[in-house]
Amino acid sequence: MPSPINYLVVLALTAAAFLPADPALGQSGQCNTEREVEARALDELTWKQLNRVYEEVGEENYEAAYDDLQNMLRRAGRDEYMQAVLYQALAQVEWSRKNYDASLAHFEKAVALDTLPDQTHFALMYQISQLYFMNERYQDALDALDLWFCTVPKDQVTSHAYVLKASINIQKEDYPATLEAIDTAIAMDDDPKESWYQTKLAAHFELKQYPEAAQTLETLVSRWPDKKTYWTQLSQVYYRLEQRDKALATMALAWRKGLLDKQSDITYLSSLYSDTGVPYKAAEVLEQGIRDGIVEPTKSHWTMVAETWYSAEELQKSLAAFREAGAVDPDGDIDLRRGFILVDLEEWSNALEALDDALEKGGLDERRLAEAYLLRGMAYFNLGEFDAAGSDWRRAARFDNTKDAARQWINHLREERQRRAS
């Protein structure tokens, strides 16, 4: 049969197991005041009664456990040590059934009696701080934790206590204090947790400390390389710091690792390539995103692909992308743009097809309509269809923006016919 003191320690640690961090337990008094408290052994009857309560808690029979403890508390009389033991047990019962306010009140009574051994007493102080935190009583949580810090030897304080302090301070929006606490926790621990760096990162962002945020994200990327959000955040911070090459390199590596799975990721990477003068990769990334079903195959996206291929002097790829854009565009504007490129390439039959599509779809403003007639006349002319060419140029001559060019082409057509007739 375990000793009564060992049982109480087990009970205290059972409560702590449900809390965010394990308390560091000390032996000194509160804030330089020696506690003169000795452990007491419980009589066998009391131990058996507590053991029955412990079993009832394990079986989730909380109501019976609570009633038994209340009966024991009434029989405890003026025995403050026994009262403290029972308040601690009541706190655990209330914790188990999620009555956190009641649990806190019982823990506070156990500590206020100041009769439990140092190990248990200080553990309860720590738990009180945690419960204040969970109840959003952040200043009370911080005060309780600071009191706990001054009761234990420094070599017994764990990194988890500083994590709790950081968590409290970030809720109080005291970001410098958050950083001080979380940096201490990270420095103390051989294996800092991901959430600790996330707390640190959040504080840097709140303070607009972007170089420090970049350093934290570099650590997150190196330790958790499969988390896309760290790559994208790091790239965006580099971009904010005007380190465009680093911003691009970070996103490009995330793309090669297959982490970019949202439209915004792909369009951002494509824009980074464009901004740094690499239009070929900008177009390649965006088109691949469309082909992979990540980027929507809209007119605007296909147009971006086409324009970027054009900037990269990949005219055939640009034409193919413009054709895709035109296929989802109810107006003729995209087909007209394709016609411009095909006229430049002197691909007259393809140009005629594109311009026919543009004029058939319609939706062109006056300026673009005039350009379409002018260009289609050129295609007809070079295909030897002079009547059709003349008809389109006469239409183009009615618009202010193309009338001069159209008249020149009409004169050229007249001269060509005269030349062929002679």
Image (cartoon, rainbow, N blue to C red):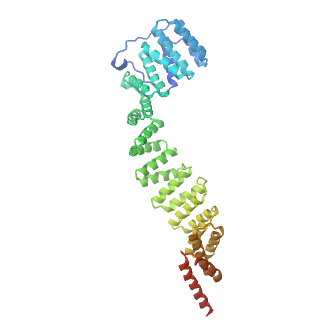
Q: Is residue 50 above or below residue 272?
A: above
Quarter of the picture containing the C terminus is bottom right
Observer-nearest of 321 and 405: 405
- In the orientation shown, which residue stands out farthest toward the left? 32
Quarter of the picture containing the N terminus is top right
Observer-nearest of 243 and 387: 387
Q: Position of residue 249 (x, y in %)?
A: 46, 53
Q: Position of residue 327 (x, y in %)?
A: 64, 63
Give left or right: position of 46 versus 139. right
Snapshot quadrant of residue 354: bottom right
Q: Position of residue 241 (x, y in %)?
A: 40, 50
Q: Position of residue 8 (x, y in %)?
A: 49, 15
Q: Is residue 13 above or below residue 171?
A: above
Observer-nearest of 311 and 377: 377
Q: Please tell me which residue is depicted at 59% across the width and 69% down the height of the picture.
A: 336
Q: Is residue 173 above or below residue 52?
A: below
Observer-nearest of 251 and 341: 341
Snapshot quadrant of residue 386: bottom right
Whether residue 407 appears in this view of the structure is: yes
Q: Please tell me which residue is depicted at 41% across the width and 53% down the height of the picture.
A: 243
Give left or right: position of 369 versus 274. right
